[in-house]
Image (cartoon, grey):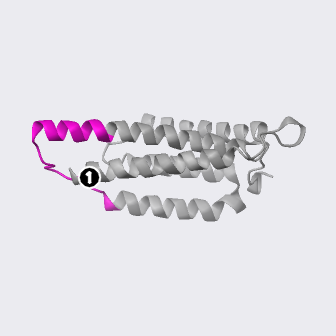
Amino acid sequence: MQEVKVQLYASVLFLVFGIAMLVGSLAMGDLGLVGAAGPGVMPKITSIALIGLSVGLLIQSWTEMKSVKTKGQEETARTKVDKKTVFGTIVILLVYSVMIVPLGFMISSIFYIFCQSILLRTNLNLNKKQIIIIALISVIVSFVINYVFTEYFALALPRGILG
């Protein structure tokens, strides 16, 4: 029950933060040079996403709290945090942040997405086909992100050794 309350409070806090961020981003311009996305586009997109996710968490927490109260059940098992996964994620993120400039966005992102996906699937037995699928998804997602940022947002991502 305590964990549900924490989620409820967190969702309200992030909802308020998202609304404040959206209000602040309305003062920024939408268009940059020659019709490219300006400084106000990303804060608006981010704040709208934050508001949407906060509302989703708020609804989920609210319904979970009501169901726990109506059933008269107390929380019996806490979510177990796998310390290896948390530590592994921190290490992968540190390696990613150090290597993004020398290797570039594409290679670093492919490496990060692949390693993170493998790390999050440690409880499952991975076969060769699943590893190939994860590798393909890593490459495709990295290319799509790079394309969207360079073409639509007109932002240069680190090129690294690919030039």
User: Is 37 above or below relative to 91?
Assistant: above
Given the current orientation, which residue lies at the most extreme left position?
Answer: 72
Residue 142, image x, y percentages = 63, 42
Residue 122, image x, y percentages = 35, 49
Q: Is residue 49 left or right of residue 73?
A: right
68 magenta-colored = yes
Residue at (74, 51) in percent of width and height: 157
Q: In this view, does 11 lie to the left or right of 142?
A: left
**What range of the chain is rendered magenta?**
61-83
Residue 160, image x, y percentages = 75, 56
126 magenta-colored = no
User: Closer to the camera, 62 or 104?
Assistant: 62
User: Is 105 above or below relative to 64?
Assistant: below
Given the current orientation, which residue lies at the most extreme right position?
Answer: 34
Q: Is residue 64 visible?
A: yes
Which quadrant of the view contains residue 143?
Answer: top right
User: Closer to the camera, 98 or 52?
Assistant: 52
Which quadrant of the view contains residue 41?
Answer: top right
Q: How many other residues sit within 10 Å of disc 1, few (<14), some (14-19) or many (≥20)?
A: few
Residue 66, image x, y percentages = 22, 37
Residue at (63, 46) in percent of width and height: 23
Q: Which amino acid does label 1 sit on?
A: Glu
SS for callout 1: helix
Count the marks. 1
Which quadrant of the view contains residue 121?
Answer: top left
Which residue matches tag 1? 3
Residue at (14, 36) in percent of width and height: 70
Q: Is residue 94 left or right of residue 157?
A: left
Residue at (55, 40) in percent of width and height: 49
Q: Is residue 127 visible?
A: no
